[in-house]
Amino acid sequence: MDIDFKKITIIGVGLIGGSFALSLKKRGFKGKITGIGRRKENIVRAVGKGIVDEYYAGFSKGIRDADLIVLSTPVGQFQGITEIIRKDIKKGAIVTDVGSVKAEVIKRLEPLMPEGVSFVGSHPIAGKEKSGIDYASPELFSGSRCIITPTPNTEKESLEKILHLWNVLGCRTIVMTPEEHDWIFAAISHLPHVIAYALINTVIDLNENILPHSGPSLRDMTRIALSPPELWRDICFYNKEDVLKSLNCFASSILRIKGLIENADLDGLEKEFHKARAGRRLIEKAAS
């Protein structure tokens, strides 16, 4: 399956950006892959490891003549980067991203697109708790879902090209609105990350000296607390309303369980736990 781009520029060559590049190469992409990064030593290593073909520390030269520009930095940097590069994006190019929040980001980025340039939001549901090019893999996206979030302004041909691209990289693509994406992922992704951070901080507040005694339960529940704080800070900011709705619902659930424990309501507790176990099994079934 051909990839209909001659030059692809990835801004932010870390875990996701690096895996994107490696996946392109493994699937026979014959064009040029350019990497742009804020840390020169990292982007030089990316070239040395064969992840990207060339690098630039500055934005404008790196995106010149690119048919596809991929924003793979923390979402809080997207707007500033786009404001810098917009004058140098060639007509007919496509800008996409790999961010975990969509509505507010697209609201800010679409008006910055020059005439003849289309933005198509995308979110591959893949990753690791550890970041950086050392963890990049050509198979990171294989078998994963990728959410594509067009708006009424999205150019149809550009949308089709992005859908095709992610399919070639091994993803199952799903199209939804940016707003639908954000309320879903506030519950199933953003909320768990916030809880993982809060859970570790709760134990620290109780007595951080007991953390080394942790067993698999705490390790499994808080694995994602190893994720980059800058990334999740931005996601919470850009998806504030949906994250707060999910947190309010979670707080109500915690208070309900707290009340059952206070009242020694064993039957009530068991029902809560049965409900949760049934829900967890649905996740296992969907993943199989």
Image: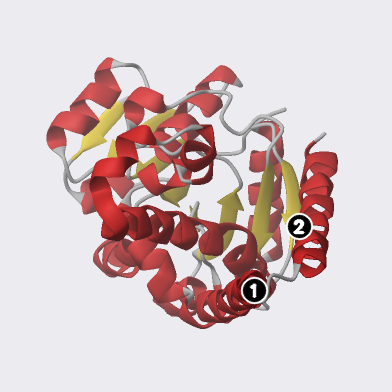
Question: In the rendered image, which quarter is residue 251 located in?
Answer: bottom right
Q: Residue at x 43, y 27 (%)?
A: 136
Q: Is residue 240 above or below residue 274?
A: below
Q: Residue at x 48, y 77 (%)?
A: 104
Disc 2 residue type (three-letter): Phe
Q: Nearer the viewer, residue 168 or 64?
A: 168
Circle 1 residues within 10 Å: few <14, some 14–19, many ≥20: few
Task: Give the number of the disc on residue 147.
Answer: none
Circle 2 residues within 10 Å: few <14, some 14–19, many ≥20: few
Disc 1 residue type (three-letter): Ser
Q: Position of residue 86 (x, y in %)?
A: 33, 66
Drawn side of residue 97 relative to residue 84, left or right: right
Label 2 – label 1 distance at C-alpha: 12 Å
Question: In the rendered image, which quarter is residue 4 located in?
Answer: top right
Q: Is residue 219 above or below residue 105?
A: above
| Quadrant where the image shows the N terminus | top right
Q: Residue at x 61, y 74 (%)?
A: 262
**Residue 74 seen from this side:** no
Identify residue for label 2.
273
* N-terminal-most mark, 2 or 1: 1
Identify residue for label 1.
253
The local secondary structure at tag 2 comes to helix
Q: Nearer the viewer, residue 43 or 240?
A: 240
Q: Position of residue 10 (x, y in %)?
A: 38, 42
Protein image colouring: secondary structure
Q: Position of residue 6 (x, y in %)?
A: 49, 35
Which residue is farthest front?
Answer: 264
Question: In the rendered image, which quarter is residue 176 located in?
Answer: bottom right
Question: Disc 2, disc 1: CB below 8 Å?
Answer: no
Q: Nearer the viewer, residue 3 or 172?
A: 172
Q: Residue at x 31, y 42 (%)?
A: 210
The local secondary structure at tag 1 comes to helix
